[in-house]
Image (tube, rainbow, N blue to C red):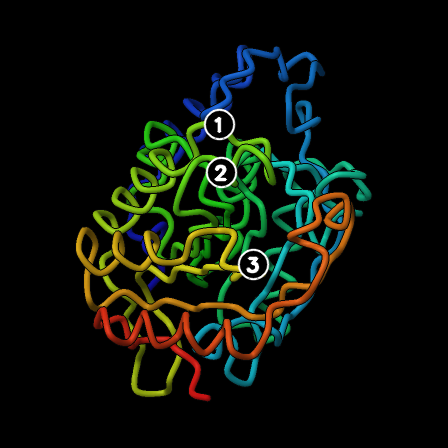
Amino acid sequence: MASYNQMPEDVLQDRARAALARLKACDLCPRRCRADRSSGEVGFCRSGRKARVACYAPHFGEEAPLVDRGGSGTIFFSGCNLACVFCQNYEISQEDQGTEVDAPALASMMLELQELGCHNINFVTPTHVLPQILEALLLARADGLALPLVYNSGGYDSVETLRLLDGIFDIYMPDAKYGSDEPALAYSCAPGYTKIMKATIREMHRQVGDLVIDEDGITRRGLLVRHLLLPGDAAGAAEVIRFLSEDISLGTYLNIMDQYRPEFNACRIPELCRPVSRQEYARALKMAAEAGLIRGLAML
């Protein structure tokens, strides 16, 4: 049973109300823009009172334990609290393609994905729209939603906000984008990213622990971390690997991704204007394996 279905209804309602109240002077993410999103003002994420959804569908390109035969029920939100120059979904994250939806419409999307046989509801880029998600979850739960929820974020999250989700989300899937602050600021306009990302992942792991995969190979609960390898190891994989292996758990499921390609504004930065080489990817996998992080690693 999904965690939110074990939570008393009044507690879930209180969490939703608390999250919605924070839209008045928005401090949901570390940027703490203080925009009055409840009245339609926008901050860095360019989102107001309603969430914008770019698309939703069963997705078969996620990690295998999330997908199996039914797929991961992804809902892609428009806007983002990061500004990655290489974003491969820039039409959604930076150019804000999508449609504003109210709580009943968002709840209906969740229920439709469940009816299609998805194994989970996967909220992609949820950081800036958590109040809207919780508001819709109340309606979806009342109408029979029972799938575990996936929090699929860029890792630039507020621990205070994440604590509102304790006992609601079963699966956390953050990026650990950078191992140092210099590239985080240069490539994603994210001051203080590494300290924030580490606090984010610590809190997520505290809530759900290591990834739990059932006898059918499907994820039920836990933490899954992604690190997108950049050319020339520009993101600093070594520190990400050290942090996860030494400070989180050797049982951490880590997906080191090699699918980087120069997109959006990446080629304005010379070191980012090429794909990752096979040799660079192999070195990163070897580094992680030698640190003891073997769950989720690809085999070359």
119 vs 174: above or below: below
Looking at the image, tell me whether mark 1 or mark 3 is earlier in sequence order.
Answer: 1
Q: Which residue appears at 54% of the width and 11% of the height?
A: 34
Residue at position x 46%, y 56% in the image:
150
Give the answer, above or below, for where 136 lies relative to 149: above
Residue 10 can be seen in this image:
no
Q: Which residue is mark 3?
A: 230
Q: Are marks 3 and 2 in contact (CB under 8 Å)?
A: no
Numbered disc 1: secondary structure: loop
Question: What amino acid is at disc 1?
Answer: Pro
Q: Amino acid at mark 2?
A: Leu
- Quadrant of the image occupied by residue 3: bottom left
Q: Dot 3, crowdedness within 10 Å: few (<14), some or many (≥20)?
A: many
Vertical comparison of 169 with 100: above or below: below
Q: Secondary structure at mark 3?
A: loop
State the separation of the CA atoms marked 1 and 2.
28 Å
Label 3 and label 2: CA atoms lie apart by: 34 Å
Which of pointers 1 and 2 indicates the residue nearer the eye? 1
Q: Which mark is residue 191?
A: 1
Q: Secondary structure at mark 2?
A: helix
Residue 66: x and y, percent?
47, 72
In the image: residue 11, left or right of residue 188: left
In 3D space, how far apart are the residues under numbered discs 1 and 3 (Cα atoms)?
19 Å
The spot of residue 74 in percent (x, y) is 61, 60
Residue type highlighted by circle 3? Leu
**Relative horizontal placement of residue 77, taking residue 230 as reference (left or right):** right
- N-terminal-most mark, 1 or 2: 2
Query: Circle 2 is placed at which residue position?
Result: 134
Q: Nearer the viewer, mark 1 or mark 3?
A: 3
